[in-house]
């Protein structure tokens, strides 16, 4: 959902590009149950915010590609590349996240950074996106053709050495959401994107970074499906398929429209079916594990119970979609507010969801 410039993540361009084309959803009743509030009260009574953090103690096994044999990995993205947003939220919800999602530039040699190495040493897996944008030397796009032709190979080899030295599997994405309006054809053609992806993969493998787990991340929005068909790097170059389902409810226009509110399941179920069948032409490998690299609902402060219910439903909903094996909540406010930590009722509902055994494999 987000891009990054000069070392900082900026407004989510994907949200803007998707929202501009999205048709209004069918109106739904404003009569809401108190389930989420009741759950939140129970959680507050049982495990108060700020209590000791628990580490998941599940019985599931983990593959070399970080696919749990049961359940779902529970991750977070806090809008920075440090430790503070992760540890602060963990203290609030009394559990550790399985992994964190951070953004870097393809021209950075110092990835993972020192904070990310600390998070890794504390038991978190890392998911790092490498944008085709200059973060170190100047600004602006780096063309896919430049990457594919080897112009950044020295930097790529240093990145690969760092990942290898990490000594544990690490999720890596190249150019998060290349199907957004801001990125589409700005960095090159879809064929050039595929060539760049494969080149990075091959340089890493040649450098011995075989612990890198490759996560292909697109928006998953229906209006971009024809683009995503063209951006598929190939089964041999991808370990996970990922997309970013959101309940936007018109927030990108500045005002939340509750008539456009959709449930967690509605935010991703169509894309889930589309990816499973291999995209529009059966060329995408729909047998790969699925990840939501970012997910969330806009926080509607006028309908807090609706926001709370949205998160309360996440674990039980995921059980009906077993190919989803990892999810990352986007705990950030940009032009839309996706923070779970900005309201006590929402936070307690999210906390309850995070303590569910299904997201503690």
Image (cartoon, rainbow, N blue to C red):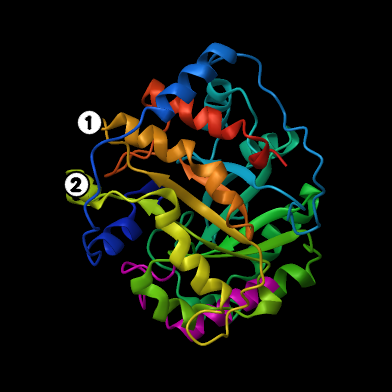
Looking at the image, residue 126 sits to the left or right of residue 341; the answer is right
Picture quadrant of residue 285 = bottom right
Residue 302, how many percent across, how many down? 22, 31
Q: Which residue is mark 1?
A: 302
Q: Residue at x 68, y 72 (%)?
A: 201
Tag 1 secondary structure: loop
- 108 or 282: nearer the viewer: 282
Q: Residues within 10 Å of mark 2 (few under 14, many from 20)?
A: some
Q: Are marks 1 and 2 in contact (CB under 8 Å)?
A: no
Q: Is 338 one of the magenta-colored residues?
A: no
Picture quadrant of residue 188 = bottom left
Which quarter of the image is occupied by the N terminus? bottom left
Looking at the image, residue 18 sits to the left or right of residue 37; the answer is left
Q: Which residue is mark 2?
A: 257
Q: Residue at x 35, y 36 (%)?
A: 307
Q: Residue at x 24, y 47 (%)?
A: 251
Residue stretch rendered in magenta on the structure: 178-201
Q: From where the camera sits, is residue 111 visible?
A: no
Which quarter of the image is occupied by the C terminus? top right
Tag 2 secondary structure: loop
Q: Is 195 one of the magenta-colored residues?
A: yes
Q: In the picture shown, does residue 257 fall above or below 191?
A: above
Q: In the picture shown, does residue 157 fall above or below 51?
A: below
Q: Residues within 10 Å of mark 1 (few under 14, many from 20)?
A: few
Q: From where the camera sits, is residue 350 visible?
A: yes
Residue 211, how many percent across, how many down? 78, 59
Q: Could you tell which of marks 1 and 2 lies nearer the N-terminus?
A: 2
Residue 43, how many percent across, how many down? 54, 20
């Amino acid at each position: 959902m987000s891009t990054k410039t000069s070392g900082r993540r900026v407004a989510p361009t994907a949200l803007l590009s998707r929202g501009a084309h999205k048709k209004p959803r069918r109106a739904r009743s404003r009569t809401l149950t108190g389930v989420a509030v009741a759950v939140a009260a129970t959680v507050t009574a049982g495990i108060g915010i700020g209590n000791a953090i628990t580490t998941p103690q599940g019985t599931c096994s983990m593959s070399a590609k970080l696919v749990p044999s049961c359940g779902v990995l529970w991750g977070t993205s806090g809008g920075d590349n440090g430790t503070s947003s992760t540890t602060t939220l963990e203290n609030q919800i009394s559990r550790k996240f399985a992994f964190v999602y951070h953004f870097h530039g393809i021209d950075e040699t110092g990835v993972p950074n020192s904070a990310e190495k600390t998070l890794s040493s504390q038991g978190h897996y890392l998911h790092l996106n490498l944008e085709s944008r200059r973060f170190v030397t100047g600004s602006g796009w780096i063309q896919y053709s430049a990457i594919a032709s080897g112009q950044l190979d020295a930097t790529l080899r240093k990145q690969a050495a760092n990942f290898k030295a990490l000594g544990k599997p690490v999720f890596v994405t190249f150019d998060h959401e290349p199907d957004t309006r801001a990125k589409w054809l700005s960095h090159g053609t879809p064929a050039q994107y595929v060539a760049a992806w494969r080149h990075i993969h091959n340089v890493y493998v040649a450098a011995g970074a075989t612990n890198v787990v490759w996560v292909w991340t697109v928006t998953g929005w229906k209006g971009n499906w024809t683009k995503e068909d063209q951006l598929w790097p190939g089964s041999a170059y991808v370990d996970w398929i990922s997309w970013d389902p959101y309940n936007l409810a018109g927030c990108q226009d500045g005002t939340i429209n509750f008539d456009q509110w959709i449930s967690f399941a509605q935010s991703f179920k169509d894309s889930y079916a589309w990816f499973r069948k291999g995209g529009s032409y059966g060329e995408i490998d729909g047998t790969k594990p699925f990840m939501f690299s970012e997910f969330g609902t806009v926080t509607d402060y006028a309908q807090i119970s609706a926001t709370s219910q949205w998160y309360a439903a996440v674990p039980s909903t995921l059980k009906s979609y077993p190919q989803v094996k990892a999810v990352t909540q986007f705990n950030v406010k940009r032009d839309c507010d996706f923070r779970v930590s900005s309201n006590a009722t929402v936070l307690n509902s999210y906390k309850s969801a995070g303590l569910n055994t299904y997201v503690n494999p």
